[in-house]
């Protein structure tokens, strides 16, 4: 072994170099796996966010439609109540007018 120290050193350097290369390759592979996993997780997070947003949009749309339906019904009820009140008030006024007219005619005949 001592006969060829330069050859031994070259072999040792080559061994160290190949080990360093193996470490670098392993680190690059690990980094690639981490990057791939992070990309997959990001895709999943986006998919879940899109699903949540779609569900929320559907829920809000449904609530808005329900509120509109209720508002329309309330408006119909109020219109009906106003019409009913108007009709009843008109009848009362007409009855009062007939009564006053009858009283006036009766007094005129006296």
Image (cartoon, rainbow, N blue to C red):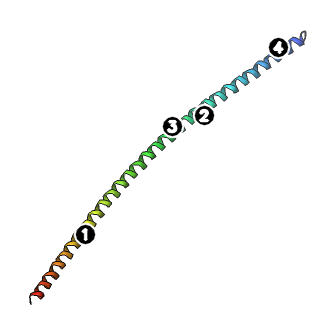
Depth-wise, is mark 4 or mark 2 nearer the camera? Answer: 2
Real-space Cα distance between discs 2 and 1?
70 Å
* First reached walking from the N terminus: tag 1 or tag 4: 4
Q: Mark 2 = which residue? A: 38
Determine whether, in the image, residue 90 is placed left or right of residue 102: right
Quadrant of the frame with the C terminus: bottom left
Residue drawn where x is 42% and y is 45% of the image: 58
* Contact, mark 1 vs mark 3 (Cβ under 8 Å): no
* Contact, mark 4 vs mark 3 (Cβ under 8 Å): no
Q: Nearer the viewer, residue 92 or 32?
A: 92
Real-space Cα distance between discs 3 and 2?
14 Å
* First reached walking from the N terminus: tag 4 or tag 2: 4
* Contact, mark 2 vs mark 1 (Cβ under 8 Å): no
Residue at the farthest top position: 3
Real-space Cα distance between discs 4 and 2?
40 Å
Determine whether, in the image, residue 95 is placed left or right of residue 18: left
């Amino acid at each position: 072994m001592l006969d060829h120290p330069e050859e031994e050193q070259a072999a040792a350097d080559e061994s160290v170099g190949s080990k360093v290369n193996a470490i670098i390759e392993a680190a690059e592979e690990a980094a690639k796996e981490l990057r791939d996993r992070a990309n997959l997780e990001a895709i999943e997070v986006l998919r879940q966010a899109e699903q949540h947003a779609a569900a929320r949009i559907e829920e809000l749309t449904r609530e808005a439609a329900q509120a509109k339906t209720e508002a329309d019904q309330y408006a119909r009820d109020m219109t009906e109540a106003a019409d009913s009140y108007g009709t009843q008030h008109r009848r009362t006024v007409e009855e009062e007018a007939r009564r006053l007219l009858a009283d006036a005619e009766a007094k005129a005949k006296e």
